[in-house]
Amino acid sequence: MLFKGGGLPHESLALQEKLFGAGPDYNFMTRIERFKNSLVRVQHFIRCCARYNLHDHADKKWFEGVAFPNEVSVLGPHSGMFIPTLKEQGSEEQIQKWVPQAEKHQIMGTYIQTELGHGTFVRGLETTATYDPKTEEFILNSPTLTSIKWWPGGLGRTCNFGIVMALLYIDGKNYGMHPFVVQLRSLKTHEPLPGLTMGDIGPKFGFDTVDNGYLQFNHFGIPRENMLMKYCQVLKNGTYTKQTRNPKFSYGAMIFVRSMVVYEVAGQGLAKACTIAIRYSAIRRQSELKKSRPEPQILDYQTQQYKLFPLLALAYAVWFTGVRMKEIYFMVNNEIKQGHTERLPELHAISSGLKAFTTSMASWGIERCRLACGGHGYSAASGLPKIYVNATGGCTYEGENTVMLLQCARFLMNIYGGVKNGRRPSGSVNYLGERISSRCTLTSEFTLKSLADAFKHRAARMIKEASERLNRLQASGNDPEDSWNLNSVVLTKAAEAHCHYYMVLVFESVVESVEDNCVKDILRQLCQLLALCGIQENSGDFIQDGFLNNDQLELVKQKQLSLLSEIRPNAVLLVDAFEFHDVQLGSILGRFDGNVYENLFKWAKKTPLNKPEDLIHRLLR
Ligand SMILES: CCCCCCC/C=C/C(=O)SCCNC(=O)CCNC(=O)[C@H](O)C(C)(C)COP(=O)(O)OP(=O)(O)OC[C@H]1O[C@@H](n2cnc3c(N)ncnc32)[C@H](O)[C@@H]1OP(=O)(O)O
Ligand SMILES: Cc1cc2nc3c(=O)[nH]c(=O)nc-3n(C[C@H](O)[C@H](O)[C@H](O)COP(=O)(O)OP(=O)(O)OC[C@H]3O[C@@H](n4cnc5c(N)ncnc54)[C@H](O)[C@@H]3O)c2cc1C
């Protein structure tokens, strides 16, 4: 791979910095300037991919991190949703027709599902696609104000195509949600096609470089061939045929993005924030540790280590979990392509759960990194505000996190119920088939196996208790829906415990796979710290059934604190190991050369507010 881990040939790095890094400062731009600048970089990016003959996925993702540091461009929805949906849901003929054009960027698409009135409840979406056998067309319509499509990335001004999710009607019968390829704009004038009202939805918390938009259909016709027909078809005479009209198949794009978000958004965002905060904490000297001694690096304060090192451990854990999630997605997706759909429910559950769990943890962690950097952490120069607003969007898009945890819980309840009826679980839930051991094996050695077993015990117990509480609610006369709702807080916590165990288990397996003993020891310390912090922060879950006692909790706390000083000598090396180029970090505090103050002063002097011609004083009269 050409670009793996920043291993760019030197002249390419110079070119990247010329193309992307040394450009106008993002922080000094208005929203419209940021959006337009992003489109210029999209053009550059596409040309560079052609010039470097970039096809390897990892190379392109690394390069994207240079071209669009801590931001999403319109390429996100295009290559992350539009193209994958064409490939997953289109017939061979449809793939041949649209995918080559999309991959050459001759058409730019997005994924158009959410509406003004509905995002989570997909079955509540209202946009209709009514088949007319006379014209052999689907007529798309927005029947109500709440049915206006709202939020899709790139829809406002950029994309000229989209996958529209709409209710299929034939002869008055509703066949449910189906995907349709819709041309939105003229390929010559780029104007919206007649029958479409569309535009940008306005400023947002972040995502300044993407024109999330709205789209209202007014009886807009598209050819019959534009319904994606891999799994089901509408014949010319309006006959509906299906191979496996499993509604879950039309949800495929969402599983893909959720599976990618763990690494691309949560993992990368938290790792960057840790890089910035830990490098800066090694540069920043403040106060006195000892009388008449020089001011120490703030990284030598135990409280600073206590803020940052658990986040460093979490960043490594989410990174490894994200890599594993991608591996599982592509493996199961290949099985599904060959008609083996048995693992689709587990893939949906684990991708939903980990997407929710890791984006929530990453958002919380990035904010703690900012807080650990004092005043300069609050400056846009730190790069942390932009990393935060970009990452925290992941808690909402692609399925709001609570809703995703409930989807994961739904699967866990199904599995647990099956175990009670004699079914043997496998994969990520195989532990639910084991007898829950109440004997805690944790000792002062804190082996990774004993720590993982503690998280396994916690998850299994919480899932069991959630299931039993659900049954009690139903037995006491509540209907299934009310019982589910009255149990939903407990269910989300059980899903989080499952994801937490999964993440600790992945980290343990990575550590055990490392051959270099020095690296293994350092990663073991991080995995121990991750698990010990998890026990400390959720101690109630571990002592509630007597699994852990107060003496063991005291041991946990002591080990946690001693690990901080053990990790301290390697802290900067551990963030350097992420190999983020300065352009990817977008941070003066996190510069590799550590030259913070000089560059902070240079940066501030360039801010537009300091332009002498802006006669601010006249406003003060
Ligand atoms: C690098 C990152 C760049 C990112 C840029 C931003 C891009 C953002 C794009 C978007 O946001 S696109 C829009 C995303 N929207 C959503 O995710 C909507 C969330 N809501 C849902 O997914 C569903 O509505 C629901 C909440 C899961 C509920 O589904 P539904 O009401 O249909 O039914 P249930 O009864 O709960 O489930 C029925 C059945 O289907 C299974 N299932 C549900 N979803 C999926 C899925 N995605 N894949 C597979 N299977 C799914 C569910 O488990 C049930 O199965 P059983 O339990 O009955 O076996
Ligand atoms: C940055 C960004 C980019 C996006 N890009 C796209 C895109 O490209 N294409 C697209 O189609 N959409 C896109 N979206 C829309 C996104 O998918 C939805 O916003 C998301 O699915 C959440 O749905 P919602 O907005 O309806 O939230 P709601 O569901 O209205 O959430 C509001 C609250 O209701 C709660 N809630 C809702 N249902 C339940 C339930 N069953 N049980 C318990 N609590 C519940 C939620 O937990 C939450 O606290 C994007 C959104 C954002 C923020």
Image (cartoon, rainbow, N blue to C red):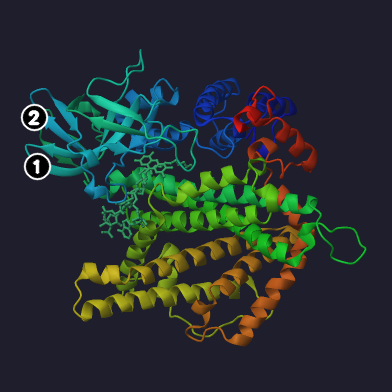
| Snapshot quadrant of residue 555 | bottom right
Tell me the number on the disc at residue 173. Answer: 1
Which quadrant of the figure contains the C terminus? top right
Residue at image x 63%, y 59%?
311
Which amino acid does the dot numbered 2 rest on?
Asn
Separation of residues labelled 2 and 1 (CA atoms):
15 Å
Q: Position of residue 500 (x, y in %)?
A: 51, 65
Of residues 244 and 542, the one nearer the viewer is 542
Q: Is residue 235 left or right of residue 438?
A: left
For label 1, the SS is: strand
Q: Is residue 55 visible?
A: yes
Q: Which residue is mark 2?
A: 237
For label 2, the SS is: loop
The first of marks 2 and 1 along the sequence is: 1
Outermost residue to the front: 621
For residue 243, above or below residue 187: below
